[in-house]
Image: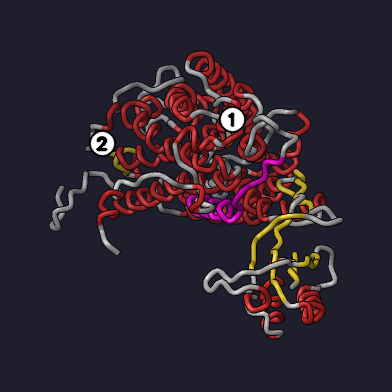
Amino acid sequence: MTASSGVQVLSGVQVGNTAYLLGCAALVMLMTPGLAFFYGGMVRAKSVLNMMMMSVVCLGVVGLVWVLGGFSLAFGDSTGGLIGNLDFAGLRDTTTVVGGDAGIPLQVFAMFQLMFAVITAALLSGAVADRARFWPFALFIALWTVLVYVPLAHWIFAFDGFVAERGGWMANTLGALDFAGGTAVEINSGASALALAVVLGRRRGWPQQPMRPHNLPAVLLGAGLLWFGWFGFNAGSALAAGAVAGNAFVTTMTASAAAVLSWLALEHRLDGRPTSLGAASAAIAGLVGITPACGYVDTFGALAIGLLAGVVCQLAIRLKYRLGYDDSLDVVAIHGVGGLLGMLMLGFVATSAVNEAGADGLLYGGGPAQLGKQVVAVLATAAFAFGVSFLLAWLVRATIGFRVDAEVEAEGIDEAEHAETAYDYTPLTTTGRSLGAARTEETPR
Amino acid sequence: MILVTAIVKPFALGDVKSALERLGVLGMTVSEVQGHGRQKGHTEVYRGAEYNVDFVPKVRVEVVVDDEVVERVLDAVVAAARTGKIGDGKVWTTRVDQVVRVRTGERGPDAV
């Protein structure tokens, strides 16, 4: 039908939900440049641009892969609960309305899900800071999106009858709870990051040489943008502007706030000071922890998850030095461990009182069954993501090479990979010719 | 003529400059430098990992003055830069043989 203003509204579309989801998709998009600042500030000044570019290129690479075929394989009609088909390839079909009563145009849902795929891919770059070549990383991300992210998204996010008739096995057959991406986004990025860190090897000089963050204000800016965008990520995953979305917003805020305080308290106890990097990391850890749970727990469940995330993720970071793998920016400890925590906590603190589609955990009158389902989902995700990512990274390393030369790593990856440097410390260091040089010389002063 | 070199904490620069101006010392050279004294920098902690910052930012103030005022200049600089805490800095003097003002060619005390 056509409204009098000339705006076309498809039959069955819920305008409010559609507007809400469009806004949420845009919020989630902002998380990726936010992540670029979060990660960029944490590396050394000589490699900040490469760090940020690895996030930016994910918008390009994953955006295209998703539109061309990724979305369709994730949300098209399932084969055995394992993978979708190519019915929605190219997103050409503009007239489909999905989600039953939710009434969302297919394209809007596809864009919302696209932003999840982009930020998950960008998260991986934190494990290979300072040492990955740019194009091999972009190639890895393209392959990884199709072979790791898409299957996982299908397994957990594709519900029978929501977009296509048959969806993925975790969501439908297993019945694991994951509201906004504890498996496909968080545990996936943590396990894939670990595989990347292992295949690429340590940064030269790590852990003996100091590699401290070069710009903590940028880290805080990035964490702020991530926190802001995360409301679209979590509350948007309700896919409708209603009570469940409101609950997800409340639990998201509660958990991240609690994580900031528990992280800083523990940090003060262990290191003597509450730090800004700690606060930024804490917010992310709390947000990660609540992600799978935000639509299935009440405020007290969120409080418990947040407080635990601030402690558990921080302790996990300290393990890195004992185990000796160089996950540069702690993707494993914050996203992997945080996602694991949230998924398992659901087995204890989930309550169907806030969401009929949820379940009751052990502490809310349910039995151990839900916890068992959560454990299966966690193990399957971690094993699949680590295994396939390891093979892909190894393949890229063996064919076109994944790491920069030792000399480049020492002198700065920005200049070698991008012919740019982030900061102009003094004009003495820059000579050369600008495109307008000839004209300027002719102009008398 | 005496060259007075003062290494002070960056935030003390304003007070040192005011103190010198009150003594009629008008010209000075200021540079950002890094270094450490006996305490050897400090420790910073990032996500539990400790980093030793060996060289800390300081400001170097250099002025050339006549012999008669050098003691007063030393006292003024020390009074302005002192907080009583570790890392306040050092001041030392060096005898200067000759000074030439580039614009006029004047030499000696006239050029200061």
Q: Give the range drawn in magenta.
A: A210-230
At 39% from the left and 46% from the top, the residue drawn is A25
Task: Tell me residue A118's x, y (percent).
Answer: 44, 37
Mark 2 and mark 1 on one chain: yes
- Residue type at the position of mark 1: Ala
Pointer 1 chain: A
Q: Residues within 10 Å of mark 1 (few under 14, many from 20)?
A: many
The first of marks 2 and 1 along the sequence is 2
Left or right: residue A209 versus residue A246 is: right
Q: How crowded is mark 2: few (under 14 residues within 10 Å), some or many (20 or more)?
A: some
Q: Which of A343 and A369 is in front in this view?
A: A343
Quadrant for residue A199, please give it.
Answer: top right
- Residue type at the position of mark 2: Thr
Q: In which quarter of the image is the C terminus of chain B?
A: bottom right
Q: Which mark is residue A193?
A: 1
Q: Mark 2 points at which residue?
A: A96
At 56% from the left and 37% from the top, the residue drawn is A412
Left or right: residue B47 versus residue A41 is: right
Question: In terms of secondary structure, where does tag 1 sit?
Answer: helix
Q: Is residue A155 visible?
A: no
Q: Nearer the viewer, residue A66 or A129?
A: A129
Q: Does the magenta stretch include residue A217?
A: yes
Q: Does the magenta stretch include residue A278?
A: no
Left or right: residue A207 versus residue B37 is: left
Task: Tell me residue B64's x, y (percent).
Answer: 70, 72
